[in-house]
Image: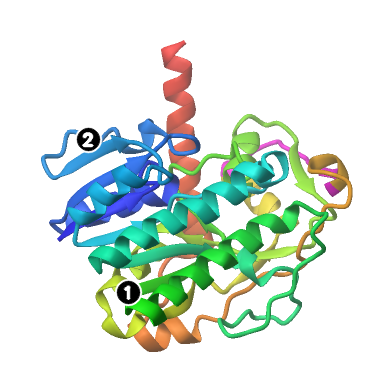
């Protein structure tokens, strides 16, 4: 297969690249490197079946050429991270909506199967736990830029499903819950790499709010496996699937676990949301997916425990820090 990955130099994109190359695919990675990093994919660029294009999903001509030449598309390019959403709301909305429209339009013209990466943020501040794919969504008011990301990704889903209904485009929507693993960066507010970095430096770990909010952390290895299987399953077209893990942990307990696993002397420092992000910032108390639907279609079950995943992240970040020190 010839696979095209938009956002291919990102955290999830780089792991997907690795798996597709291992499976024998020809892989074209496209990324404008706004949040993706060349370092994530440098080991693949020497591969004879991998090529990298530095470009943006907003470029209609480029996307037309790349999509005409591939068998399937994994559309992962998006504005990511709560920090980015709060600080650059215009960029977030434009990237997510316009970029996806360009990609979907070309995919529909060439009738190429496409995976659209969505997010658990789409559920907004719903309190019905666990979140099921056909649940109602609940957003805060429009003056809070916090919800612009959720709304923009919801528009992506509407668009993908509309193209499916109107043009029979084989589109699959995956709602990623908290996904973690090696190569993820804490730069855009991602909690696990941020905590691990602080723990390895024996610095205070900053926990936002009271730390009692819970999340379920899926390993990128499991998540990427699910994405590929969904793209290989004809019944998945025109449908939306939660992808992630379903064992919740509070953010406070996550920080304590990371301190234990790293044997760190770090302490916890609690930061109010208003100081961490912006006044009026709203967060969800609990976020947990129902995985019943994806299990029924592709038999998906997470294989990695949280400790295994955290161990992988800790090893990776230790290695990175050693490399950084030796290069100075």
For the point 64% across and 84% down, the residue is 135
Task: Please state which of residues 276 and 218 is positioned toward the viewer in this rendering.
Answer: 276
The picture places residue 222, in percent across and down from the top left corner, at: 39, 65
Residue 79 in sight in this render: no
Q: Which range of residues does the magenta coloring cover?
A: 262-273
For the point 49% across and 36% down, the residue is 317
For residue 188, above or below residue 282: above
Q: What element carries label 1?
A: loop
Q: Residue furthest top?
A: 328
317 vs 198, left or right, is: left
86 vs 294, left or right, is: right
Q: What element carries label 2?
A: loop
- Which of discs 2 and 1 lies nearer the camera? The answer is 1
For the point 40% across and 40% down, the residue is 56
Name the mark on residue 169.
Answer: 1
How packed is label 2: few (under 14 Cα within 10 Å), some, or many (20 or more)? few
Colour scheme:
rainbow
231 vs 104, left or right, is: left
CB-based contact (under 8 Å), mark 2 and mark 1:
no
């Amino acid at each position: 297969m010839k696979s095209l990955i938009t956002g291919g130099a990102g955290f999830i994109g780089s792991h997907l690249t690795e798996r597709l190359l291992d499976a024998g695919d020809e892989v074209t990675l496209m990324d404008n490197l706004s949040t993706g990093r060349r370092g994530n994919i440098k080991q693949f660029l020497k591969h004879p079946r991998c090529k990298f294009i530095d470009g943006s999903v907003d470029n209609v001509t480029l996307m037309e050429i790349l999509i005409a030449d591939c068998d399937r598309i994994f559309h992962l390019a998006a504005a990511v991270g709560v920090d980015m959403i709060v600080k650059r709301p215009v960029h977030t909305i434009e990237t997510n909506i316009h970029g996806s429209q360009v990609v979907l339009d070309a995919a529909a013209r060439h009738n190429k199967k496409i995976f659209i990466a969505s997010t658990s943020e789409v559920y907004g501040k719903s309190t019905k736990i666990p979140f099921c794919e056909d649940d109602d969504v609940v957003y805060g008011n429009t003056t809070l830029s916090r919800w612009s990301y959720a709304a923009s990704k919801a528009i992506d889903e509407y668009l993908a499903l509309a193209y499916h209904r109107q043009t029979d485009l084989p589109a699959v929507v995956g709602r990623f819950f908290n996904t973690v693993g090696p190569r993820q960066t804490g730069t855009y507010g991602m909690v696990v790499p941020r905590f691990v970095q602080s723990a390895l430096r024996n610095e205070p770990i900053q926990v936002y709010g009271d730390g009692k909010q819970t999340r379920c952390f899926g390993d990128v290895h499991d998540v990427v496996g699910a994405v590929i299987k969904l793209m290989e399953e004809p019944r998945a077209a025109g449908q939306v699937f939660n992808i992630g893990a379903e064992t919740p942990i509070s953010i406070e307990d996550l920080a304590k676990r990371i301190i234990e696993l790293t044997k760190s002397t770090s302490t916890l420092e609690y930061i109010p949301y208003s100081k961490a992000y912006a006044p009026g910032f709203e967060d969800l108390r609990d976020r947990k997916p129902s995985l019943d639907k994806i299990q029924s279609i592709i038999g998906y079950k997470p294989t990695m425990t949280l400790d295994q995943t955290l161990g992988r992240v800790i090893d990776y970040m230790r290695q990175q820090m050693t490399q950084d020190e030796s290069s100075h």
